[in-house]
Amino acid sequence: MPQKITLILRPESGFDIPYSDGYQLYSSLLGIMQEADETAASHTHDSPISSISLGPLEGKFLHSHRSRHKAVDPNERYNLKIGITDPKEVEIFRSIIQPLVLRERNLRLERGDLRAEEVSSSTASFQDIVKSAGEVKNPYLDFEFKSPVCIQYRNSKVIEMFPHREAVFHSLLSKWNSVCPEELRMNIERDEMARYIVEKPMAYDTHSVVVNTVFDKVKGHPRPIMKQGFVGRCRYTFTRDAPDGMRNGIVALARFAEYSGVGSAVARGCGAAKVTVGEAER
């Protein structure tokens, strides 16, 4: 059952964090999980599917004198959203919540700690997501891509730098089918997505994002591993002749996006999306 966790965090002090904060947050969260359940942590890290997705740290930041960094303010609180879509969601959820709530452990970043002041969660079954998709007769889907969406075109090295309907929803379809119950698997062709969905970008930009660091033996110091992607807002609507089953499936995938993220490296802060499903006027 897909789950969302919202953490309200306060810095223990003022310190710098990278603009691309996802990989540090993921490393810290994985450390927290290992303390509670090494098996769940290893499963999350090694799983071929995207077990969790991390949103960006959201709040008011201070100016940093370091290049490509921002500073957290100990007088502010910051939001962090975590999505869980793995079939082992109970174990993963427990391994996150127990250390933060019961043992009052902090998220330890490179230059300082974040303390969890509030924790909330919500769930939605795959069946509920599918059922709710059919309740809107003429839907529009507003996506706010909060962190860079990194999607490779099929098996190539070409990165999608535009919120194209086929790229976005095929990514979500792959994520859905990898974790949903067998009877709820969808078979929506890419050609159907291209033929019956219309995208209207309202504001978008492209960014590079750090998803990890590795030690460069040649240069003798760590170097970042980068991915490229797009951020911004895009509305998706349907043509008048879109089949009902296909349209309902796409609406379900849109709702699922808030749990799964879009594209690759979602555990490291990429592809976070806020989605609004509305009723369009005819």
Image (cartoon, rainbow, N blue to C red):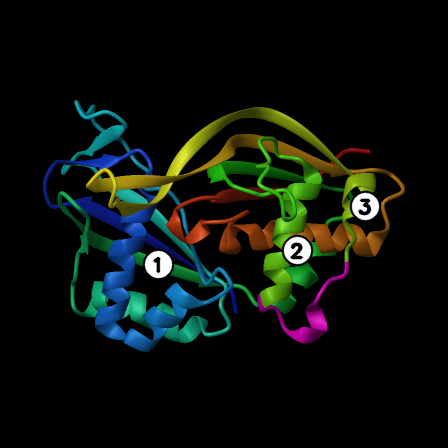
Disc 2 crowd rating (10 Å Cα; few below 14, some 14-19, many 20+) is: many
Q: Residue at x 16, y 63 (%)?
A: 104
Residue 247, given in percent of the width and then of the height, sits at 77, 50
Q: Measure how far apart labels 1 and 3 are at the Cα level.
A: 39 Å
Give the quadrant of residue 208: top left
What range of the chain is rendered magenta? 179-187
Q: Is residue 159 visible?
A: yes
* Amino acid, disc 2: Leu
Foreground pick, 99 / 27: 27
Q: Which mark is residue 173?
A: 2
Q: Measure how far apart labels 2 and 3 are at the Cα level.
A: 13 Å
Q: Measure how far apart labels 2 and 1 are at the Cα level.
A: 27 Å
Task: Determine the secondary structure under disc 2.
Answer: helix
Foreground pick, 188 / 122: 188
Residue 237, given in percent of the width and then of the height, sits at 74, 37
Instruction: Give the answer, above or below, for where 267 lies relative to 149.
Output: below
> Residue 243 in magenta?
no
- Is tag 2's residue or tag 1's residue first in the polypeptide sequence? 1
**Residue that mark 3 sits on:** 191
Q: Which mark is residue 79?
A: none
Residue 101, given in percent of the width and then of the height, sits at 22, 65
Q: Nearer the viewer, mark 2 or mark 1?
A: 2
* Amino acid, disc 3: Asp
Instruction: Give the answer, above or below, for where 10 lies relative to 181.
Output: above
Q: Residue at x 33, y 69 (%)?
A: 41
Residue 25, given in percent of the width and then of the height, sits at 29, 50
Q: Is residue 135 visible?
A: no
The answer to whether marks 2 and 3 mark residues whose Cβ atoms lie closer than 8 Å is: no
**Residue that mark 1 sits on:** 120
Q: Would residue 86 appear left or right of 71 to someone viewing this image? A: right
* Amino acid, disc 1: Ser
